[in-house]
Image (spheres, rainbow, N blue to C red):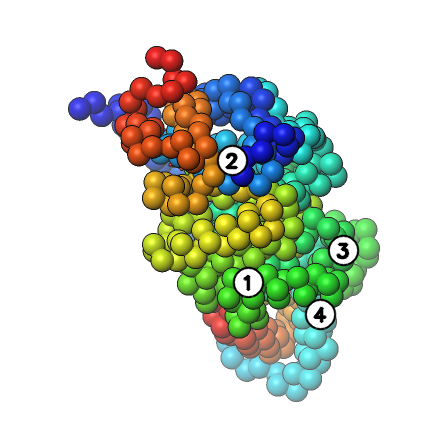
Amino acid sequence: MRIPKRTIAQRFHVRLVGSLLILIGLLIVSNKFLRLDFNALIQNFDQFLALLKDMMHPDWKSAPFVVQPMMETIQMALIGTTVGTLLAIPAAVIAARNVITNKWITGAVRIVFNIVRTLPDLLLAALFVAIAGIGPYAGVLTLTIFSFGMITKLFYECIETIDNGPLEAILTTGGKRSAMVVFAVLPQVYSRFVSYILYTFEINVRASTVLGYLGAGGIGQQLQTSLSEFRYDQTAVIILAILVVVLAIDGVSNFARERLQ
Amino acid sequence: MTNPELKPVIDVQHVSKVYDNGTSGLTDINLQVRPGEFVVIVGLSGAGKSTLMRSLNRLHQVTEGRVLIDGQSITEAKGRNLRQLRREVAMIFQNFNLVKQSTVLRNVLAGRLGYYPTWRSSLGLFKDTDKQRAFKALERVNLLDKVYQRVDQLSGGQQQRVAVARAFVQDPKIVLADEPTASLDPKTAHLIMNDLKSMNQDLGKTVVANLHSVALAKEYATRIVGLRAGRIVYDEAIRDVTDTDLTDIYNGGSLTGDGQ
Ligand SMILES: Nc1ncnc2c1ncn2[C@@H]1O[C@H](COP(=O)(O)OP(=O)(O)OP(=O)(O)O)[C@@H](O)[C@H]1O
Ligand SMILES: [Mg+2]
């Protein structure tokens, strides 16, 4: 009996070993550059305690003023997720190799989407604050682009895992590729799409609290103000509010996602 | 059955297919199928039966030669023209290829997609006559009571009958079936084969089917074509087919026209 020989790469697990070596190398090099000083962290500990002490006495009277910016944050996340999703659906379809069989097209659009996705959300926020001015408008733009990049990738990878048989079946009826998407692709991915959208919304709520810090509107902006005025008692209220809202939204969305399975 | 006067509805001319990885699927296939025939293709696993079938509706692009459907080359057809030719060639698959998350009705109506612009079908705006067509097709295959159920709630045999109903409403000239009964029990297999037979005899559709079961082949075919290693090694009307011929196709014995 002749057993097919494994290639050298397969035999010595070259890929696994190689990536491990690269990872270790990167760790060593990055530590050299950063010169992490753990002593400083310990020495500044009392400062941290002082801040913590202030925060132990939250200024509950400021609570009503948190509501409005908090709503703004949630709205930013909602609009950003919605618009991002609407743009991502056609984009993902064009990037999916089982729908568009032309490798040049899928390859080209993927490069563009990858570039979009590598832009960090904080950089986007800084950019849009510069363009659109301070306020929620910049936040919405940031979250739209951010959601678009993330959802597109989740969606096209999801589309590529579906059963391709029904896609072929639609072609054999004389249907167009667009009919194939509507009749054979979307029904297969629908429930996972909804789950991804909810997940992105969760991330967006969290992200938008931070974005406000850069002047992109919402609760983050208030957080920044309280910190710069050393009103840690108000900071405490804001952080608690963020915590409650994020937990609530995560909970609801997790529940919804489990029901979808 | 086979009327040599009639113009072939499928005309395969010198077709060869080499896959991207260099595997040769078909070599110089010539095959004429006339309207009303029920052709069964037999041959060992890997002989090229599926490759041939998928070249007929251009799910595969052939490397050489061409396939004419009702006189028009599907091999060179593009866009709208290709879709119109495909509309004339329905296909039934071994694993049904239905959208399991959708209802039976929606799957059957998909057979009409070649007749609608996408915006209209997407909104579910099918003509009343087409909905009636779908109901009638489901009645034929005895599944009218399941019309609003999701396909994944049906048994394998029922799913294949939904696929048959989809082919019905497509109203093609030709029905291709690639091992339509391979994953079904013998009784259900007969139901499906009877559906195909009724399409062939009552509606005058030309049927080409790949079958692994010699018994089914002999029972339903009007003509048997044998494939081996990508070539046609046998082609006879059913009245001339003997049991030895059939075992030879599988066992590789010498055959008429094989020449070696
Ligand atoms: N997508 C593909 N890429 C490369 N080679 C392929 C591909 N599909 C089939 N082949 C090869 O082409 C040859 C014919 O395959 P085909 O599927 O047509 O056989 P078949 O007669 O339908 O077999 P079965 O009875 O098992 O379905 C085989 O050697 C197979 O390995
Ligand atoms: Mg096959």
Which residue position is annotated with label 2?
A: B53
**Marks 1/3 same chain:** yes
Per the model, the C-alpha gap separating discs 1 and 3 is 30 Å
Front disc: 3 or 2: 2
Who comes first in sequence, dot 3 or dot 2?
2
Per the model, the C-alpha gap separating discs 3 and 2 is 31 Å
Per the model, the C-alpha gap separating discs 1 and 2 is 26 Å
Q: Which mark is residue A75?
A: 4
Per the model, the C-alpha gap separating discs 1 and 4 is 53 Å
Disc 1 marks a residue whose amino acid type is: Arg
Which residue position is annotated with label 1?
A: B140
Residue at 68% in and 30% down: B71
Percent of width and height locating residue A45: 45, 63
Percent of width and height locating residue A122: 65, 52
Disc 2 marks a residue whose amino acid type is: Met
Disc 4 marks a residue whose amino acid type is: Gln
Which residue position is annotated with label 3?
A: B119
Farthest residue toward the right? Answer: A132
> In this rendering, would A58 be left or right of B209?
right
Label 2 sits on a secondary structure element that is helix
* Chain letter of the residue carrying label 2: B
Residue at 51% in and 19% down: B28
